[in-house]
Image (cartoon, rainbow, N blue to C red):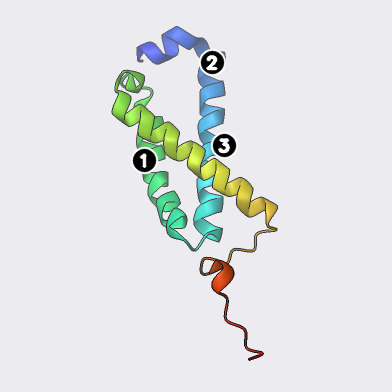
Amino acid sequence: MSTFLFEIGLVGASLILLLHLMFLKDALFVGKRDKSFLGVIALGYVGAWLTVTIGLFYDCLESCEAISFMFWFFSGLLAAQRQRLALTNNRVAPVADPGPFKLNAAH
């Protein structure tokens, strides 16, 4: 086992794994419902999630700042997108809102 398990114990390791599972749930939710570029990122994140989660037990990934930063950044990004999708009742627009330049068919 790695120092990860010895430093935080079984309770800490189970809490970290619970947090990782919550991130996986968010990524799968966004990947299924979001048709934008974040949906594609969410699907790629699932592979990175698997690598990081398995790697926790073999090597100390927290010491590698690049991997750790990217993992936590995209975890937060996808968690925020999941909340946005949940607040809009799972209705995702296929294209971005054009803003004040909408075309009216009533002309």
Q: Quadrant of the image for the N terminus?
A: top left
Amino acid type at circle 3 is Met
- Left or right of residue 31: residue 1: left
* Residue at the (36%, 40%) spot, across then down: 48
Q: Secondary structure at mark 3?
A: helix
Residue type (three-letter) at the residue carrying disc 1: Ala
Does 107 appear above or below 46?
Answer: below
- How many C-alpha atoms fall within 10 Å of the one at disc 3: few (<14), some, or many (≥20)? some
- In this view, the residue in front, 96 or 4, is 96
**Residue 12, which numbered label?**
2
- Quarter of the image for residue 79 reads top right
Tell me, yes or no, if residue 48 can be seen here: yes
Position of residue 6 relative to residue 91, above or below, is above
**Type of amino acid under label 2:** Gly
- Lower sequence index among marks 1 and 2: 2
Q: Nearer the viewer, residue 12 or 77?
A: 77
Near mark 2 (Cα within 10 A), the count class, few <14, some 14-19 or many ≥20, is some
User: First in sequence: mark 3 or mark 2?
Assistant: 2
Query: Which residue bears the numbered disc 1?
Result: 48
Residue at 62% x, 88% y is: 105
User: In whole angstroms, how far apart are the C-alphas of marks 3 and 2?
Assistant: 15 Å
